[in-house]
Image: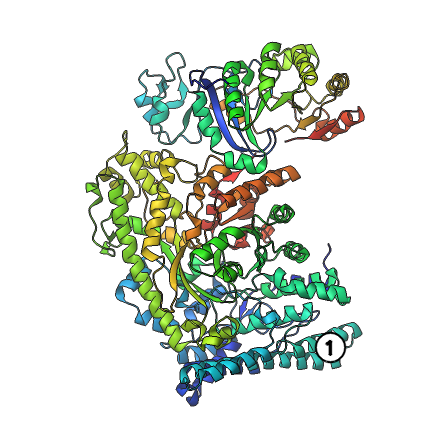
């Protein structure tokens, strides 16, 4: 048994307690920062880059100018605190501490396994009653595989159920190592066609499919999940390819379709980024017809959340 | 299941009729007391005779289609007043008639009756006038400043719940018990007097029912519709059997309860009306027997329960005025019906009737009565799931209680196990042993105002008057402990004043305004030959309701974090200056305090470590101290709507709350400051020792999407079960989205039926004051 050394730090951008849509029971989801993909519809843009980022919530700002006056590098425009000169900013966090209105945050803090466990363990009474546990999500948690392995072992030692929510865009060896330690893998399957996958996510579809295929043959518990992105993942062509892929597996897994939420654009402006165009909500089959389509094709599928 | 035409009509009538004042009771009571002989009667006899006079002379209402009969007024939504307790002035009546929220219509004729006949007689001698006259100047000053409120200033000591006695005893049986007690009393004249009064009341209720029986019979003679004629004959037959005899059928049991309810609420206007308690358990034997005999079907039982529900809804609360209207501004009179819970042997009390009652409450979707589900370890999961399905319907019912914790609370108060197993919750969240306890709610206690006074060394900053004890200047405090110590002294000081006032009022009621009818129903009043108001009940509790826990904890946390802790952001002097000027010109400071203070409800040890010390301060000042009826004082944490009123009289607080804004409610976190989700709220809330309270109230708001699917509901059920395992007393869930509330605020007429959970009860959203609407919207909603 490996003991937690506390040396392997994770970069986390959010903890979410009473997480009820990422695995069984009541869970705490730990969002790890950094992702190899950059999906057009990404809901967690603060999870994409591995480095910490300044977040500014304009609606909270009272215009007191405190941030500008405490900034040691003069990176904040006193007249317009939303403007930060990123070349000067070294993310020291002094402005975050100095903002009375809590309009600033740094997305991405470094946490030791002990620190993460301390938070995860707080809701143990709720895991016990509900059959829940902890889910590691992101970003892409497999980018921090060393930390992940360490903490999965730690959770196993303490009897906490673990799930890993992954895009499956990871080297096979890493993917399988983690899957052996997690109690449940929540695997995204987005697009099957290599070109489309590359275009919409920047990822490698074959790698995803290879990993899922391996996982399906390994005996590990996993759930496949597909976000229904209008006009992108819910096209007949993609659904057909997904169905063919699933039917080709030795044991067909269940597939959950996750509905599309359009309330994510605000997050981009908080990061000072222009929001991507995003999908056109009127395109594609939509979740209900997508479910029908897949069922007709012989896939076991249900609506997730 | 669709409602029958009958139920639909009765329900529509109940909803569509506006509340209005009926002078009938006031006139009858006044006429009685006007007689010269009435003045010389000893109070128990006078009250028994008033009761008789009322039930003998009152107009009898039997509405078309009704199966269960009897109204408190002359028809649905007609509201009697109690001038011997609180005589409404012309200005009060004017206000009731014209106020925008919770109006009670008062006709010209009624106004004249009050002006000419009621007010001149009662002015200066009503209980309310005598209470205010007899109170000490310090009590009056504190009351005026909003340090506490007083429930009994215009309503009689109330808050009790019926046990199972009436289901096995008719009034004739009860009279036989009285006769036995009379024998035992021998030459004890005081006891004999009480028992005589009780006996007269038992007779009066029978008379009332017999008058109904006769009236139904008479109506049947002129009824053209043969089906209705038969129904009237059935009503007549039921009313001729109960309450004289113990009920023999389900229908008789329901009608019997309703007569008793009317009796209690006609005799006096006890706070929180009156409740049937564990209705499912009481009615189950009748239900099963009647089903077996083939004289009842689940459908007819459902219809009878629906009729009972409508009866409750037909009785708006007695019209409150002044501070009491602000602390409890609602038509609901807090009848709470318990389902599930524990059976007398400690096993689960859930039966098929429990489910039927939940169905009825959900279908009726009425303001009153309020439904609670009592969940213990022994309760089957399906029952909690059924309750959550009802929660999803989104009108703030049922409230969910921890049956095991209620048992523990009652045991901690010194009740025997067999008695404690008969207990439950009533009103908002208060616990008592049904059928044998007089548990008085005596008023709210403004913890935050007391903190404000502590921070001004005993002065009320809004008037500059020395209201509290002189305590040290906070600027000299070396740590947060200094503040807590001074606060403790002030809490004790004000609690002493409050309790002295309570004792005065309770004694006044004991001497002048006994309740011989209620005494028939609550054990051991008959055996002891002692009135309910004199300590006749087996258990006699007085509760004080502490308000503003979240705001208080956050304020203490702010002092600790910003003044005393390393890296603090300001001196005590700066903090005090900021709150005394209500943060004018200091918005950055206010924001710093509001946003950068460890806040209760976030599972943050930085603030949660103050929970027990604060609770201990409340307990030390109140818990276990003797009241005037041979019982003890205990504490609970609930607000009704008083957190808005208390907020309005309380200045800015160290947690960054502006002057005049609402306080936190119950044991819920300050509105909108719980940012770590419901598990964190529940963990924080469970750090209070609920077992040493008589009830705590926790509101949680969820977006509808959190309990759509079976899976989501089962997770919510696990959330609640875990809170209960951690020792939580109660949780109530509001399921409504913010958009809906905003839309309702902007177009109230379109959302007239929108019911939301307020505190221990639900109310029409559009009937709430704007401040309270805003406050509810600020409460954090847990989403996905």
Is residue B5 rendered to the left or right of residue A148? right
Q: Which residue is mark 1?
A: B233
**In the image, is residue A30 above or below residue B593?**
above
Name, please, the residue furthest toward the bottom.
B37
- The chain ID associated with circle 1 is B
Quarter in which the C terminus of chain B is drawn = top right
Q: Residue B72: which quarter of the image?
A: bottom right
Say which element carries label 1. helix
Name, please, the residue furthest toward the front.
A1
Pick the residue in front: B5 or B761: B761
Residue at the spot x=45%, y=59% of the render? Answer: B328
**In the image, is residue B408 above or below residue A55?**
below
Residue at the spot x=34%, y=47% of the render? Answer: B614
- Find residue A174 and report its horizontal and vertical position in percent: 58, 12
Pick the residue in front: B33 or B754: B33
Is residue B640 rendered to the left or right of residue B625? right
Quarter in which the N terminus of chain B is drawn = bottom right
Q: In the rendered image, is residue A78 in sight?
A: no
- Find residue B467 and report its horizontal and vertical position in percent: 25, 57
Q: In the rendered image, is residue A71 in sight?
A: yes
Within 10 Å of disc 1 (Cα), the crowding (few <14, some 14-19, many 20+) is: some
Residue at the spot x=31%, y=58% of the render? Answer: B495
- Find residue B645 and report its horizontal and vertical position in percent: 40, 54
């Amino acid at each position: 048994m490996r003991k937690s050394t506390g040396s392997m730090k994770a970069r986390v951008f959010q903890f979410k307690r009473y997480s009820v849509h990422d695995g069984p029971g009541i869970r705490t989801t730990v969002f790890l920062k950094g992702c190899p993909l950059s999906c057009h519809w990404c809901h967690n843009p603060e999870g994409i880059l591995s480095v910490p980022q300044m977040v500014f919530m304009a609606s909270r700002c009272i215009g007191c100018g405190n941030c500008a006056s405490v900034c040691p590098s003069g990176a904040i425009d006193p007249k317009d605190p939303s403007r930060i000169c990123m070349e000067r900013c070294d993310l020291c966090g002094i402005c975050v501490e100095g903002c009375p209105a809590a309009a600033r945050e740094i997305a991405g803090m470094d946490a030791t396994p002990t620190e993460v466990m301390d938070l995860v363990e707080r809701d143990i009474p709720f895991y016990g009653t509900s059959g829940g546990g902890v889910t590691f999500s992101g970003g892409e948690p497999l980018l921090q595989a060393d930390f992940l392995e360490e903490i999965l072992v730690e959770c196993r030692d303490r009897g906490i159920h673990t799930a890993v929510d992954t895009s499956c865009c990871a080297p096979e060896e890493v993917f399988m190592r983690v899957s052996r330690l997690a109690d449940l893998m929540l695997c995204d399957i987005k697009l099957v066609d290599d070109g489309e996958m590359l275009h919409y996510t920047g990822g490698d579809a074959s790698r995803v499919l290879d990993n899922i295929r391996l996982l399906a043959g390994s005996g590990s518990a996993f759930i496949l999940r597909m976000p229904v992105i209008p006009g992108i993942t819910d096209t007949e062509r993609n659904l057909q390819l997904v169905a063919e892929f699933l039917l080709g597996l030795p044991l067909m897994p269940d597939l959950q379709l996750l509905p599309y939420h359009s309330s994510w654009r605000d997050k981009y402006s908080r990061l000072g980024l222009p929001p991507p165009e995003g999908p056109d909500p009127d395109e594609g089959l939509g979740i209900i017809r997508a479910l029908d389509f897949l069922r007709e094709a012989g896939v076991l599928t249900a609506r997730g959340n | 299941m669709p409602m029958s035409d009958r139920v639909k009509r009765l329900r529509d009538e109940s909803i569509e009729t506006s509340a209005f004042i009926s002078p009938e009771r006031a006139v009858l009571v006044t006429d009685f007391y006007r007689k010269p002989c009435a003045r010389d009667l000893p109070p128990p006899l006078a009250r028994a005779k008033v009761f008789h006079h009322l039930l003998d002379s009152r107009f009898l209402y039997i509405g078309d289609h009704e199966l269960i009969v009897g109204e408190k007024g002359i028809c649905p939504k007609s509201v009697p007043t109690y001038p011997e307790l609180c005589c409404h002035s012309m200005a009060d009546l004017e206000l009731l008639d014209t106020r925008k929220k919770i109006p009670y219509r008062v006709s010209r004729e009624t106004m004249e009756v009050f002006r000419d006949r009621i007010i001149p007689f009662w002015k200066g001698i009503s209980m309310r006038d005598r209470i205010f006259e007899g109170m000490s100047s310090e009590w009056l000053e504190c009351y005026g400043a909003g340090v506490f409120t007083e429930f009994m200033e215009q309503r009689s000591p109330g808050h009790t719940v019926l046990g199972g006695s009436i289901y096995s005893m008719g009034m004739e049986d009860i009279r036989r018990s009285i006769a036995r007690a009379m024998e035992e009393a021998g030459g004890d004249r005081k006891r004999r007097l009480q028992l005589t009064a009780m006996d007269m009341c038992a007779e009066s209720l029978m008379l009332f029912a017999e008058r109904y029986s006769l009236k139904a019979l008479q109506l049947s003679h002129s009824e053209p519709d043969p089906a209705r004629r038969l129904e009237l004959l059935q009503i007549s037959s039921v009313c001729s059997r109960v309450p004289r005899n113990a009920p023999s059928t389900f229908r008789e049991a329901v009608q019997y309860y309703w007569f008793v309810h009317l009796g209690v609420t006609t005799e006096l206007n006890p706070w929180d009306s009156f409740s049937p308690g564990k209705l499912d358990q009481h009615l189950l034997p009748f239900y099963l027997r009647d089903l077996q005999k083939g004289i009842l079907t689940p459908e007819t039982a459902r219809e009878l329960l629906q009729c009972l529900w409508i009866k409750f809804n037909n009785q708006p609360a007695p019209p409150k005025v002044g501070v009491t209207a602000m602390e409890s501004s609602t038509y609901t009179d807090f009848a709470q019906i318990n389902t599930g819970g524990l059976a007398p042997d400690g096993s689960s009390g859930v039966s098929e009737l429990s489910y039927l009652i939940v169905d009825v409450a959900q279908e009726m979707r009425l303001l009153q009565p309020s439904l609670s589900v009592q969940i213990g370890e022994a309760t089957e999961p399906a029952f909690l799931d059924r309750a959550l399905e009802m929660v999803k319907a989104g009108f703030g019912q049922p409230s969910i209680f921890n049956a095991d914790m209620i048992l523990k609370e009652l045991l901690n108060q010194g009740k025997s196990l067999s008695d404690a197993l008969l207990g439950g919750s009533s009103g908002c969240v208060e616990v008592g042993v049904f059928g044998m306890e007089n548990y008085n709610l005596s008023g709210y206690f403004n913890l935050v105002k007391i903190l404000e006074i502590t921070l001004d060394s005993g002065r009320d900053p809004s008037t500059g008057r020395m209201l509290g004890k002189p305590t040290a200047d906070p600027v000299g405090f070396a740590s947060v402990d200094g503040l807590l110590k001074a606060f403790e002294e002030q809490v004790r000081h004000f609690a002493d004043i409050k309790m002295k006032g309570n004792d005065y009022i309770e004694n006044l009621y004991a001497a002048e305004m006994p309740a011989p009818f209620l005494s028939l129903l609550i054990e051991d009043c008959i055996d002891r030959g002692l009135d309910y108001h004199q300590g006749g009940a087996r258990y006699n509790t007085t509760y004080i309701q502490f308000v503003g826990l979240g705001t208080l904890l956050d304020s203490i946390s702010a002092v600790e974090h910003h003044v005393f802790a390393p890296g603090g952001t300001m001196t005590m002097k700066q903090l005090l200056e900021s709150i005394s000027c209500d943060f004018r010109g200091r918005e950055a400071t206010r924001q710093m305090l509001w946003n950068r203070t460890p806040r209760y409800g976030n599972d943050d040890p930085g603030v949660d470590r103050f929970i027990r010390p604060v609770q201990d301060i409340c307990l030390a000042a109140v818990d276990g101290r003797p009241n005037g009826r041979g019982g003890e004082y205990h504490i609970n944490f609930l607000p009704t709507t008083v957190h808005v009123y208390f907020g309005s009289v309380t200045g800015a607080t160290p947690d960054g709350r502006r002057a005049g804004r609402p306080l936190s409610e119950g044991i819920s976190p300050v509105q909108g400051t719980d940012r770590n989700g419901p598990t964190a709220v529940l963990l924080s809330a469970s750090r209070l020792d609920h077992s040493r309270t008589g009830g705590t109230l926790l509101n949680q708001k969820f977006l509808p999407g959190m309990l759509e699917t079976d899976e989501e509901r089962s997770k919510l059920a696990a959330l609640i079960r875990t809170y209960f395992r951690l020792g939580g007393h109660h949780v109530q869930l509001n399921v409504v989205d913010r958009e809906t509330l905003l839309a309702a605020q902007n177009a109230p007429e379109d959302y007239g039926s929108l019911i939301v959970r307020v505190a221990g009860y639900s109310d029409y959203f559009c009937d709430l004051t704007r401040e309270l609407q805003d406050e509810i919207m600020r409460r954090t909603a847990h989403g996905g």
